[in-house]
């Protein structure tokens, strides 16, 4: 195997697998330099014998390179988005990107202060508005401004969901460089890969959770999760058909294969109804709790894509929507490639400044009295 000089190591914790993908930082648009994946069902036990370490040790041996820093990719039912904005008046002061990042850092402190049980995974610039003029890029802005508005979308996760993984990796002297939400980066990766534009939504059905992400082009508008996934579909099949869980899972997998021929049409119809009922519940829970739907933002122009292992039970004629979901004008299933998630994380790693603000350390001596006071109390 050829040598890699600047690895981007991406460790994905899925519900039914853990995978490690490694890219070369200076070689974009390439296939994974290295990839390994282990199938297992995730639980809350993070011991030193965790399968993730088997992947890391094997990769280090194969590459001849110590992986002392990784990007972590994970999902959790506790992940959700939070919108926040800040408005300030400057009396025609000249502002630049550093000033914008300072405002964003202020917002981060406020969010952390009032959400002590949460960690921020992503801080995404939604809108930058100077005197009612919108700016997509702030890198080269230098403009006299009277009023500035910064709108930010935060993606949050419960600290308890994250701390156990952090502590596990620290035991092996592995630091975490970045932490990404699986559903967000996977959806963003597919938008880039497939050239999806305008309003699009992705329902990612996992083992014990399903998530909804909505985009306008490449800009995230909304993200939320529910505690229902493929595991619940299997449970339904098990109870209704009086099957053991393992046999019910086998029936679900057989159903997902397009060329499967059933001996009894009645059995096929019953299985279809069982799966349909739970899938419709997932879709309704995700969409009807979305404020964008309640505000009637979409006028029959939202594309819906199903992703994740749980989506394999779908076929194009499986679901029929009622009038309450008439804002959806197109529905399809995306057969993901195993590289999609790691690829999305690698690209976000390299281009993070375009979507998320650059961290900036500002000396307290350069701040005004009230800014100093804010920092003192926000860090307590």
Image (tube, rainbow, N blue to C red):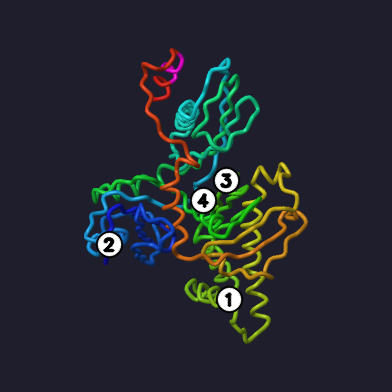
Decide which of 380, 146 is in the foreground and name it: 146
Label 2: element kind = helix
Pick the residue in front: 330 or 139: 139
Q: Which residue is mark 1?
A: 255
Q: Which structural element holds mark 1?
A: helix
In the rendered view, tell whether residue 161 sits above or below residue 125: below
In this figure, which residue is indicated by the disc labeled 4?
184
Say which element carries label 4: helix
**Circles 3 and 4 in contact, beta carbons < 8 Å:** yes
Which residue is the extreme one toward the top?
Answer: 369
Residue at 41% x, 34% y is: 359
Residue linked to disc 2: 59
Report, in whole angstroms, how far the alpha carbon at label 1 lies from the one at label 3: 33 Å
Q: Label 3: which residue?
A: 220
Q: Which residues are magenta?
A: 370-374
Mark 2 vs mark 1, foreground winner is 2
Labels 1 and 3 touching (C-beta < 8 A): no
Residues at marks 2 and 3, CA–CA distance in whole angstroms: 34 Å
């Amino acid at each position: 195997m050829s040598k890699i000089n600047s690895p981007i190591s991406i460790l994905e914790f899925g519900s039914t697998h853990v995978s490690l993908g490694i890219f070369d930082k200076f070689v974009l648009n390439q296939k994974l330099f290295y990839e390994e994946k282990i199938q297992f069902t995730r639980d809350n036990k993070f011991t030193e014998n965790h399968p993730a370490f088997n992947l890391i040790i094997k990769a280090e041996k194969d590459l001849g390179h110590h992986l002392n820093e990784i990007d972590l990719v994970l999902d959790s039912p506790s992940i959700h988005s939070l919108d926040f904005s800040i408005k300030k008046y400057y009396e025609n002061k000249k502002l630049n990107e550093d000033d914008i990042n300072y405002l964003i850092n202020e917002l981060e402190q406020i969010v952390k202060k009032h959400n002590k049980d949460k960690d921020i995974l992503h801080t995404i610039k939604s809108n930058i508005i100077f005197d009612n003029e919108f700016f997509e890029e702030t890198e080269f802005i230098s403009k006299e401004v009277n009023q500035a508005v910064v709108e930010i979308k935060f993606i949050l996760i419960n600290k308890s969901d994250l701390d156990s993984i952090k502590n596990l990796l620290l035991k092996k002297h592995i630091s975490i460089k970045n932490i990404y939400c699986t559903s967000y980066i996977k959806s963003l990766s597919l938008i880039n890969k497939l050239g999806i534009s305008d309003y699009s939504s992705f329902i990612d059905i996992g083992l014990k959770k399903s998530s909804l992400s909505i985009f306008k082009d490449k800009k995230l508008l909304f993200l939320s999760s529910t505690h229902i996934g493929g595991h619940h579909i299997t449970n339904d099949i098990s109870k209704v058909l009086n099957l053991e869980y393992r046999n019910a899972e086998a029936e679900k997998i057989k159903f997902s294969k397009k060329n499967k021929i059933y001996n009894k049409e009645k059995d096929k119809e019953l299985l279809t109804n069982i799966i349909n009922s739970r899938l419709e519940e997932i879709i309704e829970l995700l969409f009807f709790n979305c404020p964008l739907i309640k505000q009637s933002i979409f006028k029959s122009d939202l594309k819906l894509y199903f992703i994740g292992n749980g989506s394999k039970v779908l076929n194009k004629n499986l679901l029929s929507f009622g009038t309450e979901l008439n804002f959806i004008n197109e529905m399809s299933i995306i057969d993901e490639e195993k590289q999609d998630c790691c690829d999305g994380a690698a690209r976000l790693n390299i281009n993070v400044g375009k979507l998320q603000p650059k961290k900036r350390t500002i000396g307290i001596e350069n701040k005004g009295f009230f800014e100093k006071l804010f920092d003192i109390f926000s860090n307590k």
